[in-house]
Amino acid sequence: MEIKFVKADALKEKPDSSTLGFGKIFTDYMFMMDYSREEGWHDARIIPFGPIALHPASTVLHYGSEIFEGLKAYRTKSGTVQLFRPMENIRRMNTSAERLCLPTIPEDLAFQVLTEFVKVEQDWTPSADGTSLYLRPFMFGNDETLGVHAVHNATFAIIASPVGSYYKEGINPVKIMIEDEDVRAVRGGTGYAKCGGNYAASNRAGERAEKKGYSQVLWLDGVERKYIEEVGAMNVMFKIGDEIVTPMLSGSILPGITRKSCLEVLRNKGYKVSERLLSIDELAEAMHNGTLKEAWGCGTAAVVSPIGELCYKDHKYTVNNGEIGEVTQMLYDTLTGIQWGKIEDTYNWTYQL
Ligand SMILES: *Cc1c(COP(=O)(O)O)cnc(C)c1O
């Protein structure tokens, strides 16, 4: 598809790497294209970054028809820019679209517009240690009616934001509170889709945890409040004895690309890995008897985030003396090594622009 390019009057000054933070600064341009049932995807364009005008009855504003993705462009030592497993994000976005009754995008078209957009903005990819250009593709329904139905009109957009190192002060294990009241998702719901509504529903528990001094919540399943699902907006893994355990994808868990990559690295290195049900009782038992060796969250933003303390019903448990464990460190070194091109990508996961 041809992509129209509308030049900005002036380009912004690139920020200093030390001031980046997460998702606060945006690049000069954004990508947009529209969908209608009659025309399919059309009017692909790269235009100056700026506000989006919406009809006040737009579906997204009333019924939450919205999905998104998150991936990063990394600057390698030799100066090139590369993406990490972008086709995985494209496929997952289509899975989310199907669940929310939004239109899917043919994979080759999604890949074309993503890579062409990143090429236009690649100079925004910072080069300081741990920094990257965060890419946020998103799609929303914009039928101009209050009628409730699958959307007939939608917009797909991509914005980009240079982001700082997640671990500026070194990798600090986080404190996690196990949430036994609110749930994030249920089987049959939208837990496996990356949609804005899941986040809106999880904010309350996150706020409560923060007030008590915890950085994230650990979610239990929505039916029995018994099985571990995710931690905050990350997947979660545990080393119990010599087994690496992560909750199996049951429909209410987001299939993370970092999760998938961790599992592939672990299996490749010969670790004993299980994707299975893990109950809070089994985890509590492992914390009591000392067989819980490591715990970590995994997702694109932090790569891996070691868990140093777990709190369940006001009981506090320290994991691995509150320090990062050996397996967590190995996963961090392997994935970041591949992403920033510091070690050879034997998995063929990176795509050079
Ligand atoms: C995005 C996300 C993840 C992590 O997925 P990655 O592809 O690894 O970034 C995990 N859980 C939730 C709820 C998410 O939204």
Image (cartoon, rainbow, N blue to C red):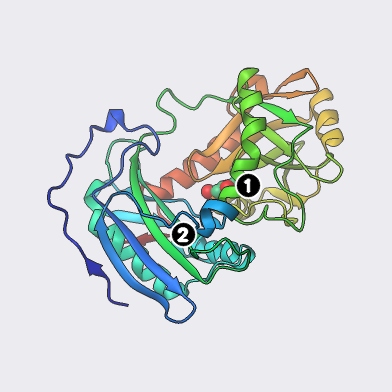
Frontmost residue, 337 versus 297:
297
Residue 105 position in % (x across, y down): 47, 72
Inspect this view and state whether residue 234 appears.
no
Image quadrant assignment for residue 189: bottom right
Question: Which image quarter is the N terminus in?
Answer: bottom left
Residue 8 vertical placement versus 309 (above, below): below
Residue type pointed to by label 2: Arg
Q: Amino acid at mark 1?
A: Asn
User: Is 201 located above or below residue 179 in the figure?
Assistant: below
The residue closer to the viewer here, 6 or 147, is 147
Q: Is residue 19 left or right of residue 85?
A: left
Q: CA distance from mark 2 to mark 1?
A: 24 Å
Disc sitting over residue 85 in the figure: 2
Residue 334 drawn at (x, y percent): 49, 45
- Of residues 160 and 148, the one drawn nearer to the viewer in this rendering: 148
Q: Residue at the spot x=63%, y=55% of the render?
A: 255
- The reply to whether the residue tagged 2 has its Cβ within 8 angstroms of ligand 1 is no
Helix, strand or loop for disc 1: helix
Q: Residue at point 63% right, 67% down? A: 149
Residue topped by disc 1: 198
Q: Quadrant of residue 288?
A: top right
Left or right: where does residue 118 sit relative to residue 245?
A: left
In the image: residue 266, left or right of residue 52: right
Label 1 within 8 A of ligand 1 by Cβ: yes
